[in-house]
Image (cartoon, rainbow, N blue to C red):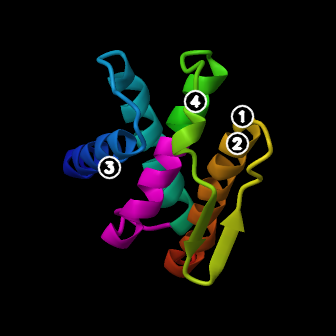
Amino acid sequence: MEKTTLNTLLSLAEKRLKGLGYQLENVDSFSLEFDISEVINLVLDETALEEVPARLHQQMINLAVANFLSSRVFNGDIDDINAEKAVKSLSEGGRSISFAVDAPIGERFEKLVNQKRAQVFDTLGAHRRMRW
């Protein structure tokens, strides 16, 4: 894994988290970098490629951010999720997903995270190479 790829993805992930309203703290740096490294390794293992294609950066950021936020919630580091900013529905390409507005915020958050994780694996197939 190239350091420039990691730095690029780290910068994009920080911007993505800011856009979602999460205020990064110094203690978050290691966890976020770890999650990004984990996603890079996952993509390289799943695709059998030597380097990460730039076309996958957005999906990788979504997965790393989803993993990061999930672990923060699981550890109790995020105890209040602002439901006013919560996404009610998403449409991307031919897919559309609606989140139950009446469901508890934790349930909606989990559904969003799972949907972002699934998108990565849907995209990886187009980049997979055969191993001999």
Q: Amino acid at mark 4?
A: Ile
Front position in the image: 104 or 84? 84
Q: For the residue labelled by badge 1, is the local secondary structure a helix, a strand or a loop? A: helix
Q: In 3D space, how far apart are the residues under numbered discs 3 and 2 (Cα atoms)?
A: 30 Å
Check disc 1 and report the residue beneath it: 106
At a point 23% along the width and 50% down the height, the residue shown is 8
The chief SS type of the magenta part is helix
Could you tell whether 54 is left or right of 126 in the image?
A: left
> Dot 2: what SS?
helix
Provide the secondary structure element on which disc 4 rests: loop
Classify mark 3: helix, strand or loop. Answer: loop
Q: Is residue 118 left or right of residue 58?
A: right
For the point 55% across and 24% down, which residue is it? Answer: 72
- Looking at the image, residue 61 lies above or below residue 26: below
**What is the spatial separation of the Cα atoms under label 1 and label 3, in whole angstroms?**
34 Å
Say which amino acid is labelled 3.
Met
Q: Is residue 105 left or right of residue 2?
A: right
Q: Of tags 3 and 2, which is closer to the observer? A: 2
Q: CA distance from mark 2 to mark 4?
A: 12 Å
State the count of labels: 4
What residue would you read off at disc 2?
A: 110
Q: Upstream in the sequence, badge 4 or badge 3? A: 3
Residue bearing the label numbered 3? 1
Between label 4 and label 3, give the one nearer the viewer.
4
- Kindly report which numbered mark, 1 or 3, lies closer to the viewer in this rendering: 1
Query: What segment is highlighted magenta in the picture?
Result: 48-66
Disc 2 and disc 4 in contact, CB within 8 angstroms: no
Can residue 59 be seen at all in this image of the molecule? yes
